[in-house]
Amino acid sequence: MIVSIVFAAGCFWGVEKHFGDLKGVVSAESGYAGGNYANPTYEKVLQNRYIKDGEKIVNYTESVKVVYDNSKTDAKTLIKFFWELHNPTQPNGQGNDIGNNYRSAIFYTTPKQEKIAYATKKEYQKLLTKNGYGIITTEIKPLKHFYVAESFHQDYLQKNPDGYCPNHTTGVKFTNEIASHVGF
């Protein structure tokens, strides 16, 4: 069965490349999710990056729609990879990319993905705390809309191998014991 989920973990270029390289991933496409205005573009999303919580406009975050073959990989594997890919404790940004358009988020498309996202968040928080990190700030919400980013952003790091793609990982990894504990 072919399934999709959307992840936001900073600049979408690196997120797209990392997920696109995984076994079982059919496609990884850069875009925008999590906002509430029509027709987001890179320029609009960038302009709205300092909107405060509680204002009428909710900005989009740079996101990647991951389509995967559930017979070759699963939601648990992808969501665990997401947690390990970036620093989910950094609010509104990753590294030097600052603004709500770089916030961390999981936009699920199935109830099973939602359960796995919350269960793995709980387990990953324990690991992060043990390693001196703060509280996870990642949004976990149902996907309402995904807008595909401009063609310039698609496969950006394949087209520009020396392009900007910093490493935002914490270095904290799930252990096999915890991985098997999170059932599903």
Image (cartoon, rainbow, N blue to C red):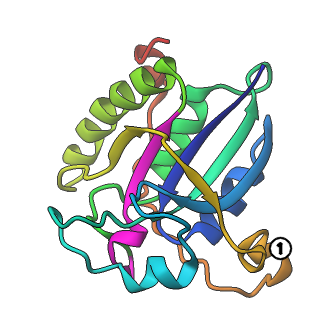
Nearer to us in this view, 169 or 39:
39
Q: Can residue 58 be seen here?
A: yes
Secondary structure of residue under mark 1: helix
Q: Can residue 178 be seen here?
A: no
Residue 94 in which image quadrant: bottom left
74 lies left or right of 169: right
Q: Taking 40 as reference, is 119 above or below it?
A: above
Nearer to us in this view, 116 or 77:
116
User: Where residue 10 sits: x, y (%)?
Assistant: 47, 67
User: Where residue 66 sits: x, y (%)?
Assistant: 67, 45
Image point (79%, 82%), residue name: 161
Magenta part of the protein: which range?
95-108
123 lies left or right of 107: left
Image quadrant where one finds the N terminus: top right
58 lies left or right of 142: left
Q: Residue furthest top?
A: 183
User: Where residue 46 sits: x, y (%)?
Assistant: 45, 83
Image point (66%, 35%), residue name: 4
Image point (33%, 38%), residue name: 124
Amino acid at pointer 1:
Gln
Q: Is residue 115 magenta?
A: no
User: Where residue 29 sits: x, y (%)?
Assistant: 72, 57
For the residue carrying disc 1, how many other residues have a C-alpha within 10 Å: few (<14), some (14-19), or many (20+)?
Answer: few
Q: Residue furthest left?
A: 54
Q: List the residue tagged with mark 1.
A: 158
